[in-house]
Image: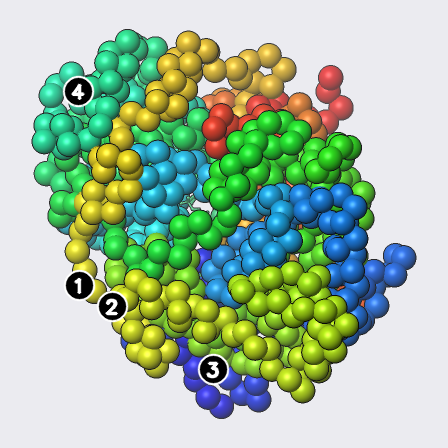
Amino acid sequence: MTTVQTMCRICECACGLEVAVADNRVTRIRPDQQHPYNWRDFCVKGASAHKLVADPRRIRVPMRRDGTRYVAASYAEAIEDIAVRLRRIVDEHGADAVAGYLGNPPAFGFPAPVFFYGLLDAIGTRSRYSAASVDTNAWHLVNDAMFGDAWLPVFVDLDACDCLLLIGSNPAVSGMMWMGDMPDGWRRALAAQAAGAEIVIVDPRRTESARRAAQHLAPVPGEDWALLAGMLKVIFDHGWVDSAECDAARGVGDLRALLGEMSLDDLAGRCGVPVGRIADVARRFARAPAAGAIARTGVAQAQDGVLAMWLTQVLNLVTGRYGRPGGAYTNLPPHDLLQGMLGSNTRASRVRGLDPVLGHYSLAELPGEITTPGAGQVRALLLLGGNPVVTGPQGASLDAALAQLDLCVSVDLFQRESHRHAHWLIPAMHWLEREEFPVIGAALRSRPFVQYARRAVQAPPGVRDEWEFFFAVAMLMDRTMYGVRWGELAAARETLRACLDGTRAFDLLPEDLLRGALAQKGVLDWERLRSSVRGYDYAEQALHHPRARVRTADGRIDACPPRFAALLRERVGVPSATVGRYPLQLISRRRTDMMNSHLSEYADTRARNRGAIAEINDHDAGSLGIVSGDRVRVESRVAAVEAEAKVSADVRPGVVVMEQGWGGRTFDPHGRIEPSAHGINCNELVANDDLSPLAAVPRLNGTPVRIEKPGRA
Ligand SMILES: Nc1nc2c(c(=O)[nH]1)N[C@H]1C(S)=C(S)[C@@H](COP(=O)(O)OP(=O)(O)OC[C@H]3O[C@@H](n4cnc5c(=O)[nH]c(N)nc54)[C@H](O)[C@@H]3O)O[C@H]1N2
Ligand SMILES: Nc1nc2c(c(=O)[nH]1)N[C@H]1C(S)=C(S)[C@@H](COP(=O)(O)OP(=O)(O)OC[C@H]3O[C@@H](n4cnc5c(=O)[nH]c(N)nc54)[C@H](O)[C@@H]3O)O[C@H]1N2
Ligand code: SF4
Ligand SMILES: [Mo]
């Protein structure tokens, strides 16, 4: 029996763990209370992570589709077959015929996503998709436009903050993080509130977090921009601004003039928050000695997420909150590796002509790119750790498209709904089996802290590191990857076999690559990183003004990027459209024991109707004749699902709330265990042709729906 200190890699909280191991099996996972960065966020997901490792449905060897079943194969067979088929597709149809989708979990690790992109680069394809288009796109766009850095996290100095404004975030369930984590953040915010500070939560549902906050505002989904514009109007009118900050930034005057054209009454009508409430919150925020505002996925996944994310940062800027104690700040990351890591393609998409965000097209576009004939039609898809049929919009249409692919390869621990049509299932290594420096997380910490994550157990015999798979495919395709090319196909095949049999080592080690890349910035000491068990602070903690890392052309923060200003002006002129057949709006909620669609098989197995509940406001329910426990039909323009009604005063009128992540099956490719599925997939209701402007995010929050008892017209 040994105990391994490592870090959890399920979510951004990056909790320090103590993993008890006996006979290469994890027997228990506990928070590491000595951990210098975080252990207090430790949750049931981390505590039960080892269930995945030992699950009998886990993919432990490459599995090849043979008619309706799967058969085990060797890596050499898998890599050769996949490389040959990819080469044929590229030769006949061009590189863009091969697409990649990166899901969320691999982003918490290191070599797999880097080598995944290495393979996509080696192939030369621009057809890239990721979970960012259902998550972070608006964040990237706003950062890029305002700061010239698509990866600039903004944190709040929670302990000293007098007014914390949280928009579209439920940290009591999700943790205080999203593209920047604040360890133990929710408890720290509550402690500050107990000492006299004020938490203000903006959320259409009175959430677990909103219930604890001093102030809760419940706007109409997707209309937060109007609330924020109203607050800024009040703040400018009263002169509650920091003139030095306003002068230092570009465009504050333009924005002020633009807001001057709007009426507070109209804005209040748009967001459904009375003028008096808007003015009151504006005053609380602007007059507080220290304050900070943060907007998260609640708005980023809604119609005008870009506007709301932008105006939130403007609020921090004009009230002089950046870089001040108790205010909003950024970090100085230990490396610059995120810049350009995902690709630099800017070509508009083939079918819909939409601009990519950070080189990626919207997941909502993937079905059309697979089914629409023509040059560049997607014929092969490589999926790394994603379940987009469940987590993306209108899963049925993506599922139908996936069935048409000439080649679909999934690299995952399990065969999920999205991998139903896969020709190959390639095993993934669980993070408890991986040793790595999680590069993305390291750049998004609110403290200058780094940790090299240790392996707790060895992977099952035969499961190879994912990077080796991607690398080997590139080599067999006779492509160059990270400067390596293995020349003649025949020779390469032989060498490869030796590598895969374990009789020869791959020449390229991701660690060497990383070590070299990290050395360039000169902040991290590799030996120290490798040898420190629980991680360490690589610099003094400081509350940096975003100015410290702005990369805009003139070195100033842009408070009024022209594209955003144009969109704002356009929005004001167009009334929100939630009338007619679909008068309600669907939003989703997360669960403590699930991570998006994965871990659902272990979540609350005793609960009745888990994942199939639709919460609606008591007044709406009254007028529809619905009571708690009724079967109801929730219908959108693209689909209908059935659920059990839960009538609640916590939900804003006009809003329906469902849990996300349910409804997808987990299969056993060995055919021993029946596919399991629980709940229903609320994302079926989300149209894939109704995307937010600029960010191309489907309306996961704010989908127009109707609700009724089945059998009614
Ligand atoms: N337990 C658990 N933790 C998780 C996850 C999980 O699945 N389970 N997922 C992780 C991931 S991948 C992410 S990205 C983060 C996300 O974490 P956050 O970005 O902090 O978002 P959530 O906590 O999901 O809270 C979003 C809130 O927005 C509200 N909302 C919906 N529509 C609107 C709107 O139009 N306006 C406003 N103002 N609010 C709205 C919802 O009611 C919800 O309470 O959480 C992470 N943490
Ligand atoms: N309605 C609604 N939809 C949403 C959201 C919402 O709030 N509401 N949230 C969105 C957000 S924020 C996100 S991030 C996306 C997530 O979208 P996805 O990333 O597509 O979905 P996950 O459910 O996280 O799927 C993860 C897959 O990765 C596999 N996996 C887990 N660990 C590993 C690993 O270490 N290696 C590999 N190779 N595979 C692994 C799991 O088995 C699972 O099949 O969902 C989005 N969808
Ligand atoms: S899943 Fe839970 S234990 Fe793991 S990092 Fe996130 S909060 Fe911590
Ligand atoms: Mo996410």
Q: Quick check: marks 1 and 2 in contact, CB under 8 Å? A: yes
Mark-to-mark CA distance, 4 and 1: 36 Å
Instruction: Identify residue for label 3.
Output: 20
Q: Which mark is residue 201?
A: none
Q: Quick check: marks 3 and 2 in contact, CB under 8 Å? A: no
Name the residue type under label 2. Asp
Q: Residue furthest front?
A: 488
Which mark lies nearer to you, 2 or 4?
2
SS at circle 4: helix
Instruction: Identify residue for label 2.
Output: 537
First reached walking from the N terminus: tag 2 or tag 4: 4
Q: Which mark is residue 540?
A: 1
SS at circle 3: strand
SS at circle 2: strand
Q: Quick check: marks 4 and 1 in contact, CB under 8 Å? A: no
Mark-to-mark CA distance, 3 and 1: 33 Å
Mark-to-mark CA distance, 1 and 2: 7 Å
